[in-house]
Image: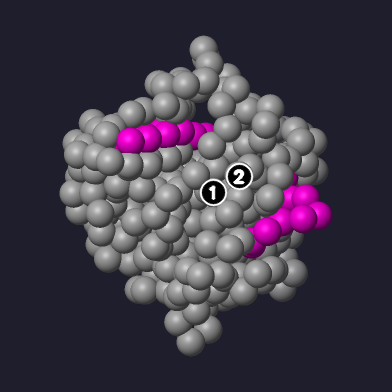
Amino acid sequence: MFTFTCIALSILVGRGDIATSYWSFDEIENGVSEESIMGLDAQVHGAELQQGALHGGLFFDGEDDYAAIESMGLAAKTIGSLAEGTISTWFRFDHSPESMDIETIFYLGAMQDFSSYGTSANCYELEIGHFSAQRRLYWTNISTQEETTAIPLCWSTTDHLQVGQWYHIVSTTSSMGTHIYLNNVELFDPGNCTWQFGDETMRRFLGDVLQQEAVWFGKGLWNNEEQFFEGVIDEFTIWNRALTPEEVTAEYERVASVGALSIHEDIPYEIQITADSLVLHGALDNIVKIKWQIAGGAWNSQPNISLESIWDLTIGEPVPAGRHEIRVVGQNAANRTFADTRILIQLDLNADGTIDVHDLLLMIGAWGECDCIEDLTGDGRVSIADILLLISAWG
């Protein structure tokens, strides 16, 4: 009997008071990432720490990086015995699977045995991709008995996910069936979830895996070979019961609400510049992307993978003449934004690289009340105060 429970998922879950296992992936010490509840520590093979959804996360290179629970006896007695429960994690995948490729986030099952499909013979596998080049999320349970193949349950996200974007997935399973949440939105069939086999009334969980030989993060079995995840996995939690919708929201907000960015106080609020480059720096917390915009123009951005609490930017694009706001925004994994601003005062009014009499003549020509670039002080008029600013940067 071969049971293939392919649960393609897009889900997120809330933190209850009885989590069975929790991997924060905030630290790697002596090659080990600690599991803080049951002692199911993960041996890290090649993966490195980067900025994750909540502080540290494990970055996998897609070549041979993975993390594995070493104590499979304890894993089988704890998470491997669960007939129902909840799984929650944040992830960002950096590679779009090609035909017969998958990006495995989580795997519990056989170490080497394959099915007639080329999949693992026995497993639960959270993956992106499947039997064709695609970016849907799947939760797949496979069981093999007597070489007979059956597919009692399989679901997937209807839509393709986006490479390089963070997601929170939660799957809850109980006697009432299965509920799936992606980024704090429940998925339904028909609509944003597709049940390929079975339906939402079915219950299958980690205890249904018959061959519990390995628990891997970032590694799985597919197409008769080991396949590896490229991207970041973070905040992986397993509960021994199905979380409520309210708890799913609380778990999402536990991560989504965290973030901060500020420009350092040693940088004055008004910055006089004459060149086309500017260096800014400051503090941040739990930021995955930094963006900036000058004078309401186009946004520029760069990823933040560092776990440092400081940031710096060298802004090389030209700053228009006059007085303009620069807005620096930190974005966390949930796309929440945290911003700070400064005022840039570009004194080179004619953009010739020199502050001289030509700029002074432009200012004199705009003398008096005006809404113009020559109003460097921002008081609605061109006056002596503006000339003094210009003279301070003469040359």
Residue 14 belongs to the span the image colors magenta: yes
What is the x, y in percent for residue 335?
Answer: 60, 42
Looking at the image, residue 46 sits to the left or right of residue 69; the answer is: left
Q: Nearer the viewer, residue 376 or 76?
A: 76
Q: Which residue is at 68% across, 59% downward?
A: 20
Q: Earlier in the sequence, mark 2 or mark 1?
A: 2
Q: Which residue is mark 2?
A: 83
Region in magenta: 1-22
Q: Nearer the viewer, residue 120 or 218?
A: 120
Q: Mark 2 to mark 1: distance in Å?
A: 5 Å
Q: Nearer the viewer, residue 241 or 336?
A: 241
Q: Which residue is mark 1?
A: 207
Quarter assignment of residue 40: bottom right
Q: Which residue is at 35% across, 73% downward?
A: 46
What is the x, y in percent for residue 8?
Answer: 44, 33
Looking at the image, residue 365 sits to the left or right of residue 192; the answer is: right
Residue 4 belongs to the span the image colors magenta: yes
Residue type at tag 1: Gly
Looking at the image, residue 128 sits to the left or right of residue 157; the answer is: left
- Which secondary structure, mark 2? loop
- Whether tag 2 and tag 1 are in contact, CB under 8 A, the answer is yes
Residue type at tag 2: Ala
Q: Which residue is at 77% across, 55% downward?
A: 18
